[in-house]
Image: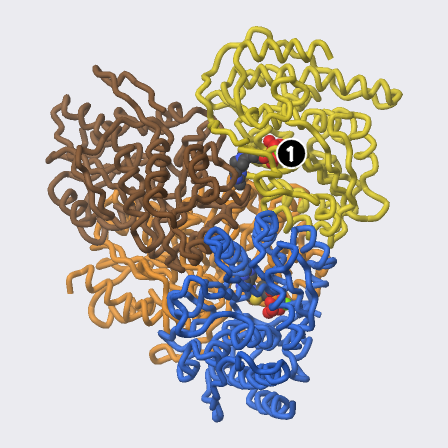
Chain colours: A blue, B yellow, C orange, D brown
Amino acid sequence: MTVDEDLVPDVRPEAVPDDAFTVLGRAPGEAPRAQVVAHLTEAARLVRRRDIQMVRAAGLGHIGGEFSVIDILVTLYLAAMNVSPDQLGDPDRDRFILSKGHAAAALYTTLAMAGFLPPEQLGTFMQPMSQLNGHPARTKIAAVEASTGPLGHGLPIAVGTAFAGKLDGSARRTFVVVGDGELQEGSNWEALMTAGNHRLSHLCVIVDRNRLQQGARVADTNDLEPLADKLAAFGMDVVEVDGHDHGALLDAFADVPAASGRPTAVIAHTDKGHPISFMSDNVAWHHKVPSAEQVAQALAELENR
Amino acid sequence: MTVDEDLVPDVRPEAVPDDAFTVLGRAPGEAPRAQVVAHLTEAARLVRRRDIQMVRAAGLGHIGGEFSVIDILVTLYLAAMNVSPDQLGDPDRDRFILSKGHAAAALYTTLAMAGFLPPEQLGTFMQPMSQLNGHPARTKIAAVEASTGPLGHGLPIAVGTAFAGKLDGSARRTFVVVGDGELQEGSNWEALMTAGNHRLSHLCVIVDRNRLQQGARVADTNDLEPLADKLAAFGMDVVEVDGHDHGALLDAFADVPAASGRPTAVIAHTDKGHPISFMSDNVAWHHKVPSAEQVAQALAELENR
Amino acid sequence: MTATIDAGASERVLHDCRDAWVATLVELAEADDRVVAVVNDSVGSSKLGPFAERFPDRLVNVGIAEQDMVGVGAGLANGGKVPFVSAASCFLTARAMEQVKVDAAYSQHHMVLVGQSPGMAYGELGPTHHSIEDLAWLRTIPGLTVAAPCDPAETAQVLRWAAAHDGPVFVRVARMGVPDVVPEGYRFEPGKAVTLREGADVTLVATGIAVSRALDAADVLAAEGVDARVLSMPTVKPLDEAALVAAARETAGIVTVEEALTSGLGGAVAELLVTRQPAPMRFVGVPDTFAPTGSVQWLLEHFGITAAGIAAAARDLLGR
Amino acid sequence: MTATIDAGASERVLHDCRDAWVATLVELAEADDRVVAVVNDSVGSSKLGPFAERFPDRLVNVGIAEQDMVGVGAGLANGGKVPFVSAASCFLTARAMEQVKVDAAYSQHHMVLVGQSPGMAYGELGPTHHSIEDLAWLRTIPGLTVAAPCDPAETAQVLRWAAAHDGPVFVRVARMGVPDVVPEGYRFEPGKAVTLREGADVTLVATGIAVSRALDAADVLAAEGVDARVLSMPTVKPLDEAALVAAARETAGIVTVEEALTSGLGGAVAELLVTRQPAPMRFVGVPDTFAPTGSVQWLLEHFGITAAGIAAAARDLLGR
Ligand SMILES: Cc1ncc(C[n+]2csc(CCOP(=O)(O)OP(=O)(O)O)c2C)c(N)n1
Ligand SMILES: Cc1ncc(C[n+]2csc(CCOP(=O)(O)OP(=O)(O)O)c2C)c(N)n1
Ligand SMILES: [Mg+2]
Ligand SMILES: [Mg+2]
């Protein structure tokens, strides 16, 4: 199935009634694991709530890929990564780069949830002169480490920053999320080859493996399988996890750097549009903007989880 | 070991005394295999003779990568490929693309050996207004299928022409030679993914696996190993051969299209500068220009083979 | 897909030129089975649905891989096909620049590069998705024809011409709504300006979606007693040198208008005039900056690529 | 590496600016351990040998992968390094164009892009290896400084300035032999022309290796009684607008000279003049064509990028 949808659909901005947003902040450091997972689960629920409202209000966004990546982002920013709003000038902070920059709204909402952005700013998403551009820009938001948008840029940049960390003997880690469709870009394989050969052990490449790209399934466009073999042949330590399981993600991220000394590739199996019944695994929702009724239904489904 | 040599060294053109060149043409079609191999062996010897003289005369060239690829070129043009000078307008002719275009002199001499270029033209190599440019140009020589020079262009083009052949149900085959260092370019992995997924069975990607690139060994720059695993994971049917063994090359090319329906990748194990004692496997000879004495010694070594 | 806007007094129907693009492509493909389309996943944003349905085998989708896309296009040309290589203009040009230079232009392959949704059509998506550089970059590449049609009829004409032209052509296909502009029976010729309005005071030279805006500006100026000539320049390369030199001689100067960096059409005209007929110019387009966030309509207003902005530039040139 | 040529009466020592490049880089790296070099295999042609010996760990060789190279450079900047990203100019620009646009310019990373052996330095290797488009392309990218130093001293100055400048800089480093040009004690400033010779009849504006040729042309013209002003323009972006407007006002016109497509420096000056001070111009450089095979010296003669060619252009402008 292919989609005849437009990258910028014709839905126009509309005020959204209920866009309250509670900033939960980081999961408590010393808490038992179940409590951390509960914190992340609730945070992800709130981030999805706000995200869909932002997309509806802007009349623009990439909701499918946002909902598939939110659990990963929340796990990183609220628990796994060593970075906090008052630590952005610290050279030893962990780095995160959203290579699939079209999921910007998911990043912005997660940054707000983690205290890196004032929640009010979320209301400016895509508005004239807003700092919340359709793709994240490092010149506009302090917490954004790299400007992305064209696919295949974030991973080479992540390799560079991981390389710098290695040169400095720093313990910091670099996490980068790439889309699965994005892995069709050759620049990523250049970067993986470099990372593998230089044994950038503190680099963690997370593949948002939602099996869909813009117009069709990845398998029907230019298939990636056998993906784990490809990544391993390029020198990665490959781990596969359920990308919506916060506990599994926590474990995978805790294992970076891998004992092997190789960079880690986490294939995070996700569903595009997760967990909304009418969006999930449906290619139509790459950048479709939900109607008011669809927003209401999605919010209800989120409530009942 | 790295080399501090220049891409355009300071040796200036010089007349070369003995540049006679015998055009042997195609190996006889119905001849016994031993006779075909003997024909190719002699042709390759003559091509190397002429090549080193051209490089010396021009004061420019990439002799290491030329000597590593000549046996492959000669096997293709004088025996394996279904193409002849009077058949260049035939849509069903086999195609050849030298993606590592810096070995242009090897292609020109082979084309002359196969009757595609008047041998006199070889004397114009790199001279002002010559059609024999430092990298092959399709607008300058009818038998050149694709203009190359920047690494990583020829393979995507080969995928395109193989795709066209598939659309037309043509039996023609497309052969493309890439350097091993060249495989660091991501555009090649984009093209391999496309070829693998579309099962372009009539495409044959030949890797000139001479283990050296411009400044150092491939393994010391950005290693390719495990190369066969990489190629297999991208959907290729992988074959490894001695790239200086005409018989082995003939067999590998005769197996295209592979029974599997996948494109073929031939990893041709070669030596850069083969078979000259002081050049072979020596990274200094990527684009070094031999002195008159070195030319004499190389010619003597070729005589005695 | 069409929309209407209230332009001055009258309601005008606006068209998405991609509809003309796909209709023309299907028509060309029906007449010539060498015609194929090559894309980088963006089947939807290239509006290739109707083509994909009619000719599923002739749609070569290489996935998100623009270098491969242009190289594969060149190879398809080698294999006897007539490829239309279609992608968002920003990625087709910036990401595959060396392939455009080498595989298309230097190689002189018969291939058509179709830059979709150029300029600031992807307004809110930001500068990474704006293709404001394409005209400035591509007009410098030898051997490449660079076209930016101004309405659906001209889009169709350019594509038909490109399909028959044995050489590489870049065509900017607009998604922003434009009214019908070219006259009935119009025939596109590369390097041939279209005089849409005669005038003796100042000349407005525009390309692509800016042409209808230049016409609107001429109306604004006429109301003030300024008689503006309007030239549509469907190809930024080659330029219509004779028409431009004549305009520089016969009117007070030239205002160029484009939805692009002003080094595109503006720069091309400036380079011609200084050597042939020095004359004052004003540039309407995107100045030397990455655009802020905003919709395309907002950005066009922001940069004055509007009837009012063009009229103001003309007034400035005339010292009024 | 130095060579001598017989220029007119006197013997001049010619320098390969890459020697100044690597010496300066080593010096910067000694003073600041954030300085790293990033390359695409071309350690030799970037003349990085001395740096590689002294700082083996700080040489990041990504192999033949220009997109990765620029992205890695941006990441190293994110990681607190000051990367000098060095490659043959043709590949650095064309192959990594989107990375230059997005990762360097739009992102405003503190990084230096070093375009080696630009123009037609790789003469016989052909248009795929010529970087004649770099100035025309890069000068249109917002937020990027584009420099083409004219001799070893200026090369060193530009690199030192770039190392301290918190933003992206592109520097063309010439391999073609050039004599010493800038005066003793010269300090580079971006956007600041250097008046190498006063003159009232016509102005020659040159950049990079063309500067010494413009000076030679002024000698030729002086012998004919033509008093040519010579401006060296070390940055094509930003331009020295004041100096150019003054030259257009005070002399009969401007001849630009560059080892590049004339849409580079020539186009930049033309765009300035038509809006500020319309004046006649002539362009010396590579016209709109891919060059034939030939050595760089032969090609410079072929295209008239020589004292004689420049003088002829000035005469033509003056109608003599
Ligand atoms: C270089 C480039 N080409 C094309 C696009 C247009 N584009 C935006 S999103 C997308 C699909 C991405 O698919 P995937 O990486 O799988 O992301 P996800 O499924 O997580 O949304 C495409 C083709 C782009 N942003 N960049
Ligand atoms: C895009 C690009 N980057 C850099 C170069 C410069 N270059 C020419 S040959 C070469 C080394 C190629 O090595 P390999 O592919 O192994 O070829 P071989 O050993 O057969 O000569 C390099 C880096 C180039 N031609 N194209
Ligand atoms: Mg996906
Ligand atoms: Mg090699």
Task: Please say whether residue C94 is visible from this viewpoint.
Answer: no
Q: Position of residue C98 (x, y in %)?
A: 51, 45
- Identify the secondary structure beneath mark 1: loop
Q: Quadrant of the C terminus of chain D?
A: top left
Q: Position of residue B15 (x, y in %)?
A: 51, 10
- Asked if ligand 4 lies within 8 A of label 1, the reply is yes
Q: How many marks?
A: 1
Horizontal relation, residue B127 to residue C319: left or right: right
Crowd tier of the residue under label 1, counting other residues whose Cα lies within 10 Å: few below 14, some 14–19, many 20 or above:
many
> Residue at the location (62% across, 30% down)?
B142
In the figure, residue D236 lies in which quadrant? top left
Task: Please say whether residue A17 is visible from this viewpoint.
Answer: yes
Q: Position of residue B129 (x, y in %)?
A: 47, 23
Instruction: Give the farthest residue toward the top.
Output: B17
> Residue at the location (21% across, 39% down)?
D254
Horizontal relation, residue D264 to residue D247: left or right: right
The chain holding disc 1 is B
- Vertically, is B245 above or below D41? above
Horizontal relation, residue B22 to residue D89: left or right: right
Residue underneath mark 1: B211
Q: Quadrant of the N terminus of chain D?
A: top left
- Vertically, is D224 above or below D145? above
Q: Position of residue B141 (x, y in %)?
A: 59, 28
> Residue at the location (32% across, 54% down)?
C266
> Residue at the location (65% across, 29% down)?
B143
Q: Quadrant of ligand 3?
A: bottom right
In the figure, residue A222 lies in which quadrant? bottom right
Q: Nearer the viewer, residue B101 or D168?
A: D168
In the figure, residue D253 lies in which quadrant? top left
Q: Which amino acid is tagged 1?
A: Arg
Q: Nearer the viewer, residue B217 or B131?
A: B217
- Vertically, is B212 above or below B236? above
